[in-house]
Amino acid sequence: MPCEICGCPNVKWLRVSTVARHFACSTKKVRRLIKSGCLLGVRLGREWRVDHASVDRLVQECSLVGDPRPPQ
Ligand SMILES: [Zn+2]
């Protein structure tokens, strides 16, 4: 069952290619988000894995639908 927030598979670490497909963007873009700190990732050799919770957070923070938190 996919995640309710981001629609990605419910696993702790997501492949960069999976995240890219879900957001319809390039894997390069996903890696850039990791490097810029928007997403939390770990490097496994030549591949990156993306922390699922950081994807959910990005979706929730950037999403225009739903219930955005008021600025503090
Ligand atoms: Zn998710």
Image (cartoon, rainbow, N blue to C red):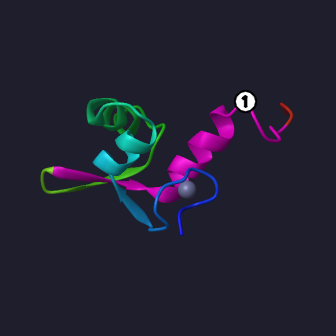
> Residue drawn 82% across and 39% down?
69
Question: How far across and down, in percent of the image, does residue 21 sit?
Answer: 37, 42
Q: Is residue 52 magenta?
A: yes
Q: Is residue 21 left or right of residue 45?
A: right
Image quadrant where residue 72 sits = top right
Q: Amino acid at mark 1?
A: Leu
Residue 22 against residue 47 in the figure, above or below: above
Q: Residues within 10 Å of mark 1 (few under 14, many from 20)?
A: few
Quarter occupied by residue 70: top right
Quadrant showing the N terminus = bottom right
Give residue 33's quadrant in the image. Answer: top left
Q: Relative to the observer, which residue lies in front, 22 or 37? A: 22
Q: Residue at x 31, y 37 (%)?
A: 31
Say whether mark 1 is within 8 Å of ligand 1: no
Magenta-colored span:
47-69
Question: In the rendered view, does 24 fall on the left or right side of 2?
Answer: left
Give the image location of residue 46, x and y in percent.
13, 50
**Which quadrant contains ligand 1?**
bottom right
Residue 10 position within the rendered picture, expressed as x and y whole percent measured from the top left: 49, 67
Magenta stretch holds residue 54: yes
Residue identified by numbered label 1: 64
> Toward the viewer: 22 or 53?
22
**Residue reaching furthest left?**
46
